[in-house]
Amino acid sequence: DVELGRVKTKKITQAEVFRGRGLRDYIIKMAERLDPEGNGNNMEFQLHFGIYTDAFLDKYLQGNEPLKGKKSHRITIFIIPVARQGFKFKNDEEVMAYELGGLQP
């Protein structure tokens, strides 16, 4: 474990097996949901570093205590769809992040 100010976290993953099929399927799904008329041409994807906080895990992984324990305070990289300037997603509630590395929430 590593102390970052008041936040206790686990060391970042140094290596991960990556399979492109899951990422490809995610990109296609986000384009279909968020920009169906533009076929995804009005959006891009950004990488964001993040930490799984207990508040996040309590909200999105209710009832899955083993997975919550594995992810608690874990540093990871998320891929997030972002609308290009001047465009608004058809439905912002459909925006989903993808955890790079295959440990999907």
Image (cartoon, grey):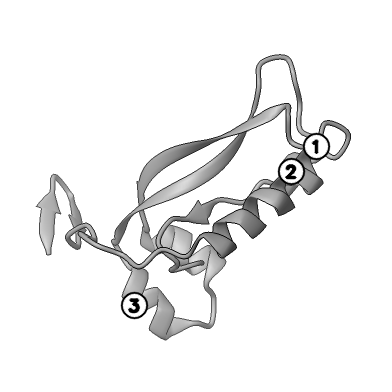
> What is the secondary structure assignment of the residue under circle 2?
helix
State yes or no: discs 2 and 1 in contact (Cβ < 8 Å).
yes
Q: 76 or 40: which is nearer to us?
A: 40
Residue 96 position, x and y percent, is 62, 51
The amino acid pointed to by label 1 is Asn
Residue 97 position, x and y percent, is 55, 51
Q: Residue at x 79, y 47 (%)?
A: 33
Q: To which residue does mark 3 refer? A: 69
> What is the secondary structure assignment of the residue under circle 1?
loop
The amino acid pointed to by label 3 is Gly
Position of residue 60 in the picture relative to residue 85 (left or right): left
User: Callout 3: few (<14), some (14-19), or many (20+) C-alpha neighbours within 10 Å?
Assistant: few
The quadrant of the picture occupied by the N terminus is bottom left
Q: CA distance from mark 3 to mark 2?
A: 32 Å
On residue 31, which mark appears? 2
N-terminal of the pair, mark 3 or mark 2, is 2
Q: To which residue does mark 1 refer? A: 39
The amino acid pointed to by label 2 is Ala
Quadrant of the rendered structure where residue 47 is?
Answer: top left
N-terminal of the pair, mark 2 or mark 1, is 2
Residue 49 position, x and y percent, is 35, 44
